[in-house]
Image (cartoon, coloured by chain):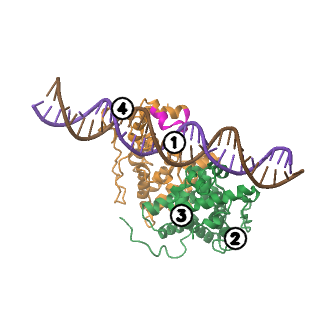
Chain colours: A orange, B green, C purple, D brown
Amino acid sequence: MFPVLYAVFMSRALPPFPSPQEPFDVPELLEVGPAPEEACLRADAARNRARLLEAAARLIAEHGVAAVTMEAVAAAAQVGKGTVFRRFGDRTGLLMALLDHSDRMLQADFLAGPPPLGPGAPPLDRLRAFGVAVLYRYAEKLDLLLAAQTEPTRRLSHPAVSALRTHMTVLLRQIVPDADCELLAQTLLASLDPAVIHHQTRRCGMPMERLEAGWIDLVARVAGTPPPQPLRSPEPPRPSR
Amino acid sequence: MFPVLYAVFMSRALPPFPSPQEPFDVPELLEVGPAPEEACLRADAARNRARLLEAAARLIAEHGVAAVTMEAVAAAAQVGKGTVFRRFGDRTGLLMALLDHSDRMLQADFLAGPPPLGPGAPPLDRLRAFGVAVLYRYAEKLDLLLAAQTEPTRRLSHPAVSALRTHMTVLLRQIVPDADCELLAQTLLASLDPAVIHHQTRRCGMPMERLEAGWIDLVARVAGTPPPQPLRSPEPPRPSR
DNA sequence: CTTCAAACGGACCGCGGTCCAGTTTTGTTC
DNA sequence: GAACAAAACTGGACCGCGGTCCGTTTGAAG
């Protein structure tokens, strides 16, 4: 079951994440609107957009990301090449549009999902769960993410990534209020970068569990608390030292 | 004085860094050979290689990295296009060759330079100095580094980056011997990635001093020790509350 | 001088991206 | 509901660049 069907109806960009001026854990105004683009398109444009996304997803499923050529997608969707560019800007835009759905899913999870990822758990637990969630989500879509990362600096300004960063900043403010949380958030997020994950898993052969443990350990060090008891079970922290 | 002159005679790749099976601080066998390539080339090939690098450097100095087109470089060096590709493999290879010199400089500094960057200082001090050195070196060559980063995953396997990672691993083994130092090294190095630096300085307008302070703080947290001097002397009033 | 691996150079290809003339949709007015 | 004008969309020709290929040239060893 590949992401053809549900990716089709997703829009290209997430809505701008409201920057939280509150360092408190107010239920983080969930701004995961449904599909902000899509709607205000002309009928034919919307149809073509859907066909293009579907075609792209099909190409990926059948021949890998490398086969996603703008011309190929256009042809597969029976649409002119210019249309693809008009709709998505460039290849990266198209690929990011394909990622949009899972971006939203993740965002919904940590904004309004069940604890420990969602609100309700202590910030430290949320941070742990957050990193792990990001880790696995990126691992799942690694090829697409790497392919979408032509200009490495562009990813960091993408709304979805900004949302991650903002969320992490909010959590950090509650955990280590005296630190430079914005900077620290970016730093920690960098260690979860798709390129890093790729290098560690594929190149160095590290299993995902090791990366996960590494994240847990890193969070503990940054927070200045001992790591939670066992490696795997996300229990409330028990000061054992 | 741009890097035209001395970059010209540098080779493309650093020699493979010997992986240290010693967790101790043996004087880290300095393997910064002079110019391993270059020598065994045919006379005309070596001459053309030099001319190409010089031409590329000139183009960058005059018109920015974007002007470094393989055709343009070939033309400026009065050489066929095929020659450029034969010599450097691809555009990224050419750009990395231009970075080779400063790669070696940095490597020499932390392998055999004066403390606290070089051997002789306590590992924790070395680690601090190391991060700061990397930070400023990357900042200095940001454009080139970003341009050379077409495939984001390729950078991480580059010998120069591997050398940084290895060195950091060695230091970490001495500082936090019970941690997963390989993983931690990569994690920490990721926070110094050119793309991250670019985003923080250019996009978010953070001054370099702030990044530097962030690194110092991060190291302290990871090492589990309080930061060296005062927490941070020139702190901008940025508790954005 | 002979010989040949190595290096050369430019024609060639595919793809990302631009452009614009022509077409379709939408909303408005009668 | 028909006519119409503006706005939006379409598609394919076109361009530049990265990268490949292959026939030709050249340096150096015997």
Q: Amino acid at mark 2?
A: Ala
Label 2 Cα crowd, 10 Å radius (few <14 / some 14-19 / many 20+): some
Between the residue at mark 4 and the residue at mark 3, the CA separation in whole angstroms equals 48 Å
Residue at position x 35%, y 56% from top?
Answer: A19
Residues packed near mark 4 inside 10 Å, few (<14), some (14 to 19) or many (20 plus): few
Q: In whole angstroms, how far apart are the C-alphas of marks 4 and 1?
A: 24 Å
Q: Position of residue B54 (x, y in %)?
A: 62, 61
The reply to whether the C-beta atoms of the residues labelled 4 and 3 are less than 8 Å apart is no
Which residue bears the numbered disc 4? A47
Q: Which mark is residue B112?
A: 2
Three-letter amino acid code at disc 4? Arg
* Image: A45 above or below B164: above
The dominant secondary structure in magenta is: helix
Q: Secondary structure at mark 3?
A: helix
* Pick the front one: A159 or D25: D25
Q: Residues within 10 Å of mark 1 (few under 14, many from 20)?
A: many
The amino acid beneath tag 1 is Leu
> Can you say whether A190 is above or below D21 in the image?
below
Q: Range of the magenta residues?
A: A63-74
Q: Residue at x 60, y 66 (%)?
A: B3
Q: Which residue lies at the image location 49% right of the left edge and 73% below the top edge? A: B231
